[in-house]
């Protein structure tokens, strides 16, 4: 097959622009039919999806069903159920200044949009934005990650089979193909991945003034309170579920590190050890319930974090590696220094460092001294601490007494802030991310005030002031020359 | 303020530190600052009018209507509403996660940068500041150096009223902009041209800074046949007021060109001329009702638009220029060539091309074959046509039977799409533009759902399937072992 280059990109975009221009994708029935098709695709091809993810990441089937297929089905269902409601123009009140008038906000599709997705949840992160793009009535090109090749080719096959190919396409490839895509003029680019590529994407978008959504990651912290008698077992299990139970830590909202007090840390480590063993057995390298590391590059990157001199001797659990199988066992490091490698980049893998502080309040400073993370978690029963946490920690999302769960709640916007990204999606927020909110104001021909027009006089000025800022009384006063 | 790079760096650092103290997050601080803006406007009305007259020859009534009044209205509205805007909104959480509570909490972004433009140098500086303050940010504003009197007014007066630790004015031209853009901002709000917008967004990309771009575009006015003479008259009146009455056409939401059916064009043009005379008199330079062109460079740009011989031949009214006063007479052109610059570039001045079409419905195709404008105006009483315009064209906003009023409607988002920009502001939308919507979820440490955890087995898989379908009855059966696995 010929390589996808800039020329091919331009042909593709022209084709989709033509479809979009025909108005086909704007129609409610089209949107619904495509969402239904997507739902069907998910229903009929579960095993193939599970197999593809086994190939790409050795992802446990349950994780695939829970976090990719079921989440997508839910997104589809929500969109199908709510679409009419989302599409309806929103009536807004108009003020006295523009009386008599009526106004509404109409959601309209942006046009032809590009979705670039990531390898860690290659199905979810590809199709979830596509659901939003379709619901909002756009034509869409999806570029799945080349680092999850089985999923990428499965997506190509299934989308060609199920979706309307005059407006929904998949382009596979790596850097060259992505560059060719980024040279085109899009009406929106939705990117999930890392900050380095995000900068390239946004700079490319700037050439055409294309708005972007950037879904990135960051070091999402977990604070564990030692003073409020939390149920440590439950807390530990929830941390593990969010860390190793989410693609073995290769998830943008996985806990990256823990902060707790010095005296409590040993207790927490013990609890983590016990629960990890009950989940993954005595030899976690052999566990079928853990994903592997995606590829040798990432394996090497993670190994380097462990080999850093600054963390030598800090490993209190795990640390086993099997390079041939790309496996690293769940690993806990205690008391790592803050200037170590592992504390200065997103870990994105099965290593969990614990930072200890004398007083729990210090953990807020630790978090705020770094870039804003995508998520932050806190385990506590202390009401004051919760309030302080919500008030002082800036992150994409916060969860108290659990991890990662906010991702599954479609009534909450999902997205980052600062270094963890720009824009949000999920549920209605996805629809909004791919819509332009057009202001529409209806006026009639009566009720025209001559004050708007020259020649300008003092009376006009007075009336104008009343009209702009005052209420009815001020206007009446102005009419009678009282103010 | 002397803006060498070092000093700028210091300023940005100080602002960041001040933000970290959390002072700007309090509702009292926000309200105090908003009140201060109101005071500033009240107490400096004359000074502002004077500065606007100096920079643009803007008439005081125009200055009040388009700048001061808008700022007052916006500040008052924010002052009245900010507490409500700051409150978190509750989100519904599926029963599956019970007991849990979800909310969306707006929080300030941090240190934000505002670039304002020269055509409404007061409004377009203060209105975004109002949004930034309402949302609890610290702000740097860079007024346009092309409106120097207003720029220095802002630089001198803002510190007298506002918290100088949190709100700074940095004056300067292109070189200062370049320096400013080297820094890391938490948001950049830019009003201006697409050319500069590209530079701003490219710089923003280096730090993943979100941007709002308020640009312009060629805003068309569709003029349908209006059978009622008084409607017809009023429509033309509104067009004349909007084209020349706001900053002599130097406005991003000004009418760029008119679309009208060929058979009505002469009727429309005659009435346009009549209202031009009525509003602006015979001696327009002397009457001082019309703003002048901002500077020589723009004056020349506009004159060049008219120089194309085919364009010059299409002038049917006005066209006289006065270089010493930087004044261009309200000018009407009939069907200038569509590939001439006057029809491919945003005019941003007192020239009005009238483009004739056979059927007014063709306007939709005409507009759609060009970049998306900031606004589409349409004068029509035909409801089917209205619906068609809304559904089939794309623009920042659509206004029927009037002009410019969308700018004053706080409940409507103001902003562009495509070439006319992205992001929106005004009223609550300004607050949102300068806020991050933080998702917050509260859970308890009791009631644990065992199938969430490995080791995985078929039972847990089925459980999760049912849970995602929110099939609670199925879940109960499943837990009791009464449901068949599939």
Image (cartoon, rainbow, N blue to C red):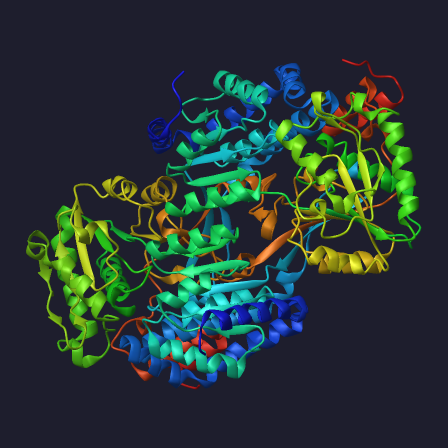
Does residue B462 appear to the left or right of B32 in the view shown?
right
User: Taking A368 as reference, is A229 left or right?
Assistant: right
Residue A481 image offset from top left, x and y in percent: 39, 85
Q: Is residue B349 above or below residue B46?
A: above
Name, please, the residue furthest toward the front. Answer: A309
Q: Would you say B43 lies left or right of A406 here?
A: left
Q: Residue drawn 93% across and 50% down?
A: A229
Query: The C terminus of chain A is located in which quarter?
Result: bottom left
Would residue B247 be seen by someone viewing this image from the given angle?
A: yes
Corner quadrant of residue B125: bottom left
Quadrant in the picture for the N terminus of chain A: top left
| B96 is higher (above) or lower (below) than B412 | above
Residue B342 at x, y = what percent?
Answer: 18, 54
Q: Nearer the viewer, residue A115 or B241?
A: A115
The total of numbered circles placed on residues is 0
Residue B447 in view, yes or no: no
Splitting the image into 4 quarters, where does residue B33 fall? bottom right
Q: Residue at x 60, y 51 (%)?
A: A417
Please give left or right for residue B440 compared with residue B281 in the image.
right
Q: Report the front residue among A379 and A43.
A: A379
Q: Which of these two is toward me, A297 or A121?
A: A297
């Amino acid at each position: 097959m010929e390589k996808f280059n800039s020329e091919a990109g331009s042909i593709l975009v022209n084709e989709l622009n033509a479809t979009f221009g025909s108005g086909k994708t704007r129609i409610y029935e089209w949107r619904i039919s495509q969402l239904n098709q997507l739902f069907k695709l998910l229903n009929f091809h579960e095993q193939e999806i599970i197999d593809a993810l086994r190939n790409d990441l050795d992802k446990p089937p349950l994780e695939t069903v829970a976090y990719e297929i079921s989440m997508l089905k839910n997104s589809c269902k929500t969109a199908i159920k709510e679409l009419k409601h989302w599409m309806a123009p929103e009536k807004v009140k108009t003020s006295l200044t523009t009386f008599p008038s009526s106004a509404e906000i109409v959601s309209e599709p942006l046009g032809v949009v590009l979705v670039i997705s990531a390898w860690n949840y290659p199905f979810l992160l590809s199709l979830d934005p596509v659901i939003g793009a379709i619901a909002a009535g756009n034509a869409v090109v999806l570029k799945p990650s080349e680092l999850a090749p089985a999923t990428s080719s499965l997506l190509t096959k299934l989308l060609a089979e199920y979706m309307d190919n005059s407006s929904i396409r998949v382009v596979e490839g790596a850097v060259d193909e992505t560059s060719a895509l980024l040279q085109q003029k899009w009406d929106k680019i939705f990117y999930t991945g890392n900050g380095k590529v995000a900068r390239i994407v946004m700079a490319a978008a700037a050439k055409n003034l294309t708005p972007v959504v950037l879904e990135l990651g960051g070091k999402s912290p977990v604070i564990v309170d030692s003073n409020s008698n939390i149920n440590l077992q439950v807390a530990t299990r929830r941390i593990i579920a969010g860390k190793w139970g989410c693609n073995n830590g290769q998830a943008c909202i996985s806990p990256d590190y823990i902060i707790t007090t010095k005296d409590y840390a040993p207790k927490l480590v013990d609890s983590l050890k016990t629960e990890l063993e009950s989940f993954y057995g005595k030899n976690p390298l052999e566990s079928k319930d853990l994903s592997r590391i995606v590829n040798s590059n990432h394996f090497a990157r993670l190994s380097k974090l462990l080999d850093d001199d600054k963390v030598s001797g800090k490993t209190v659990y795990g640390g086993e590696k099997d390079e041939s199988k790309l496996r690293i066992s769940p690993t806990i490091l205690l008391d790592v220094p803050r200037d170590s490698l592992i504390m200065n980049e997103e870990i994105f893998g099965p290593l969990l460092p614990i930072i200890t502080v004398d007083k729990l309040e210090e953990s807020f400073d630790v978090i705020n001294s770094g870039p804003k993370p995508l998520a932050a978690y806190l385990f506590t029963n202390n009401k004051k601490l919760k309030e302080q946490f919500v008030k002082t920690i800036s992150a994409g999302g916060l969860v108290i007494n659990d991890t990662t769960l906010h991702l599954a709640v479609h009534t909450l916007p999902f997205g980052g802030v600062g270094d963890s990204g720009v824009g949000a999606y999920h549920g209605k927020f996805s629809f909004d991310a791919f819509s332009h909110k057009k202001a529409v104001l209806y006026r009639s021909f009566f009720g025209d005030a001559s004050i708007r027009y020259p020649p300008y006089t003092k009376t006009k000025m007075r009336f104008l002031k009343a009209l702009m800022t005052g209420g009815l009384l001020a206007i009446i006063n102005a009419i009678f020359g009282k103010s | 303020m002397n803006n060498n790079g070092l000093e700028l760096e210091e300023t940005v650092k100080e602002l960041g530190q001040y933000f970290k103290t959390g002072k700007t997050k309090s509702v009292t601080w926000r309200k105090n600052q908003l009140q201060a803006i109101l005071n500033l406007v009240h107490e400096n009305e004359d000074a502002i009018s004077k500065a606007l007259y100096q920079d643009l020859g803007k008439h005081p009534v125009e200055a009040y209507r388009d700048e001061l009044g808008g700022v007052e209205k916006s500040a008052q509205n924010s002052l009245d509403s900010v507490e409500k805007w700051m409150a978190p909104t509750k989100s519904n959480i599926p029963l599956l996660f019970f007991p849990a509570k979800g909310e969306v909490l707006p929080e300030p972004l941090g240190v934000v940068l505002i670039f304002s433009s020269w055509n409404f140098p007061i409004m377009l500086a203060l209105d975004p500041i109002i949004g930034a303050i309402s949302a609890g940010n610290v702000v740097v504003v860079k007024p346009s150096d092309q409106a120097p009197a207003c720029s220095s007014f802002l630089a001198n007066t803002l510190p007298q009223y506002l918290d100088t630790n949190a709100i700074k004015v940095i004056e300067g031209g292109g070189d200062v902009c370049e320096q400013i853009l080297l820094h890391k901002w938490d948001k950049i709000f830019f009003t201006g041209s697409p050319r500069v917008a590209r530079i701003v967004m490219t710089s923003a990309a280096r730090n993943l800074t979100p941007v709002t771009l308020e640009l312009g575009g060629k805003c068309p006015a569709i003029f349908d046949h209006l059978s009622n003479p008084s409607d017809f008259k009023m429509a033309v009146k509104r067009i004349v007021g909007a084209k020349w009455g706001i900053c002599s056409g130097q406005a991003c939401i000004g009418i760029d060109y008119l679309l009208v059916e060929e058979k009505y064009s002469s009727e429309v043009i005659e009435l346009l001329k009549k209202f031009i005379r009525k509003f602006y008199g015979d001696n327009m330079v002397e009457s001082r009702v019309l703003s002048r062109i901002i500077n020589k460079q723009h004056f020349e740009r506009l004159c060049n638009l008219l120089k194309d011989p085919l364009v010059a031949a299409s002038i049917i009214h006005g066209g006289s220029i006065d270089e010493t006063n930087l004044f261009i007479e309200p000018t009407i052109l009939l069907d200038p060539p569509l590939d001439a610059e006057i029809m491919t570039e945003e005019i941003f001045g007192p020239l009005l091309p009238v483009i004739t079409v056979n059927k007014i419905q063709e306007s939709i195709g005409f507009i759609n074959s060009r970049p998306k404008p900031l606004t589409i105006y349409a004068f029509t009483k035909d409801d089917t046509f209205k619906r068609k315009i809304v559904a089939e064209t794309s623009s920042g906003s659509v206004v029927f039977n009037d002009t410019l009023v969308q700018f004053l409607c706080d409940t409507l988002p103001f902003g562009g799409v495509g070439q006319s920009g992205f992001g929106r502001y005004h009223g609550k939308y300004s607050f949102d533009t300068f806020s991050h919507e933080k998702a917050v979820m509260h859970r308890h440490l009791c009631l644990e759902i065992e199938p969430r955890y490995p080791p995985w087995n078929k039972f847990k898989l089925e459980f999760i399937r049912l849970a995602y379908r929110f099939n609670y009855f199925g879940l109960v059966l499943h837990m009791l072992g009464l449901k068949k696995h599939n």
